[in-house]
Image: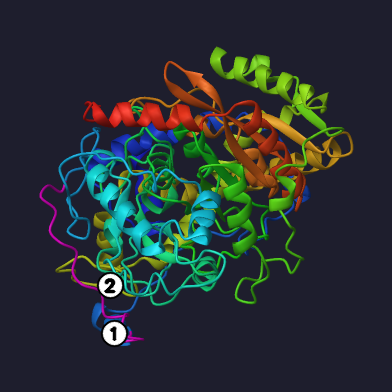
Amino acid sequence: MRISETLIRHLEGIARLETSREERRGLRCDLGRFLEYAADLPDVDPAQAIGTAIPTHLSGDRPDEISPSLSQTEALAAAPTVRAGHFLVPPVLPAAADSSPPPLAVAPPVANPSIPVTSSVGESALTALSLTEALQGLEKGEFSAAEYRRDLRARIQQINPVLNAYCYLEPSDEAETPSRSGTLRGLPFALKDNLHRLGEPLQCASRILTGYRAPYDATVTAKLLAAGGSGLGRTNMDEFGMGSSCEYSIHGSTRNPWSPAHSPGGSSGGAAAAVAADCALFALGSDTGGSLRQPAAHCGVVGIKPTYGRVSRYGLVAFASSLDQVGPITRDVRDAAQVLELIMGADPRDATCRDLPTPGLMSEVDNGVRGLRIGVPSGLGRMAVSSSIRKSLNDAREALVAEGARIVPVDLPELEQGVAAYYLLANAEASSNLARFDGVRYGARAADCADLATLYSRTRGEGFGPEVKRRILLGAFTLSSGYYAAYYLRAQQVRRRLTDAFDRLWRRCECLLLPVTPGPAFPLQSRLADPLSMYLEDLFTVPASLAGLPAGSVPLGLCDGLPLGGQVVAPPFAEATLIRTLAALERAFPMRATRGAAVAAALADGGGEP
């Protein structure tokens, strides 16, 4: 589809977003390519479309209008000056060294004064422990939580200059750690930089949130603290969760511990890299279209997205509200089961969070899959999947059969329509959710703006990075007059069809085996010039997100020294089945010793050059 500069300008007005001439040239090309790809969605009758969980009041007949705004003086006068000691009139954005778009290259790690640096990479028996092993060690008195935290901080200070997994490390406070009780007994956890932790910087890897501090704890954060956990730091991510490589970050790119010249995946790439490099016992991240499962696969660890509504989203900075979910990245499946038990449950502050009993997942780890019917889509051969992924999936299928499972061939042609539907719907929601970042209420604002409209557009233009701008404008296009029915409503119907297809599938099997990604981790820089190729990384992860299903990634082997992941998708709220199946695959393909040796060798080599 041909996108004119006039249309881009129109979308900028709707989104209150200022871009440069060079950016507009790139946006015309990128949006045109994606919309050509999305044009293959099947034609549907818009009257039959069923809405997402987020209601919308737009219609295809409503004209696009840009409402008149208050003056800058009137708007800033109405802004809060102080609220709980955190909400101030936003500071002015620091001047950029160059107003032109950044070059398509790997940004170096950004020096962070909160993370001291030491010179060599050491090893610690404590930091290599799983959560289960660490809790056992504390129970036996072999070490204290303070000793564990000290060793972990030392390892982060040694390794973070290479991997750039963390963007913030909490100040050391060992005095309070030994006295903590509860399930976690004072052990530390890491948070993705889009989850609230009271008083800490919260930037979502974006320049627009410069200086913002969280005024409260996210529900999942509060639950871990109540269970005796202690905060450790914040992990790097793609800006606002928009990316599959952890390269779109104001903090610089994160690198893969297995091969620092490769991407760790995204958007929770910092969390996955930290866990894989023994720089975090476990981490919480978010998954909108695969942002836990894909980086977990690329880093050789476990990542789980729960059922939509199983875990509270309160305190998670929204990307796409009908898709976002919080979940864990861990060393093994048992650890993931334990963390899920701690963070699941009803929350009156999240209307989408279901009030259901919390299942006992730890007991499912050793139950095996004997008698379980596991579906495998028959159409993977015609899809763009590498030979190494096909082989790993065949090996996984044989391993499950050896454990007593029954493989059921299934037909799920809707898988191939998922990427187009997902990026139309997710970006439509993102364009609305990110409208709140306007230079008045949160983060930072542009300087020397003559009126409020200029303040909005310039703040957003200077504060958002290239991928966020691309997605905001795609979302504005999708919802705009003349295109709403042709794209947004069609994508909604594809989502409904996909959900219905899964519902039919669960009559024949208890879970589904899929790849996580089309191939192993890709080199840094290799996808930045072609956003569509980056989007296609999510080919196998977005279907579960669109249908709100629980899904997890577990390592299945290696290809050229890089880990490959397998994905299990289960029916709604069937996390117990998910854990059973992931654990069976983990037993068949043990990767822990391999990961430790490979990461140690890669880091000892100095990280290499991307």
The colouring scheme, among rainbow, by chain, secondary structure or one colour, is rainbow
Q: Residue at 65% across / 45% down in the picture?
A: 546
Q: Residue at 26% across / 42% down in the picture?
A: 159
Q: Which residues are magenta?
A: 80-99
Whether residue 518 is situated above or below residue 71 in the rendered picture: above
Inspect the magenta stretch and tell me whether residue 97 lies in it.
Answer: yes
Check residue 322 in the rendering and tell me which mark sits there, or answer none: none
Q: Secondary structure at mark 1?
A: helix
Amino acid type shown at disc 2: Leu
From the viewer's perspective, is 75 left or right of 502? left
Q: CA distance from mark 1 to mark 2?
A: 9 Å
Whether residue 290 is situated above or below residue 324 in the rendered picture: above
Amino acid type shown at disc 1: Glu
Neighbour tally class for label 1: few under 14, some 14-19, many 20 plus, Cα within 10 Å: few
Of residues 439 and 549, the one nearer the viewer is 549
Query: Residue 460 appears in which quarter of the rendering?
Result: bottom left
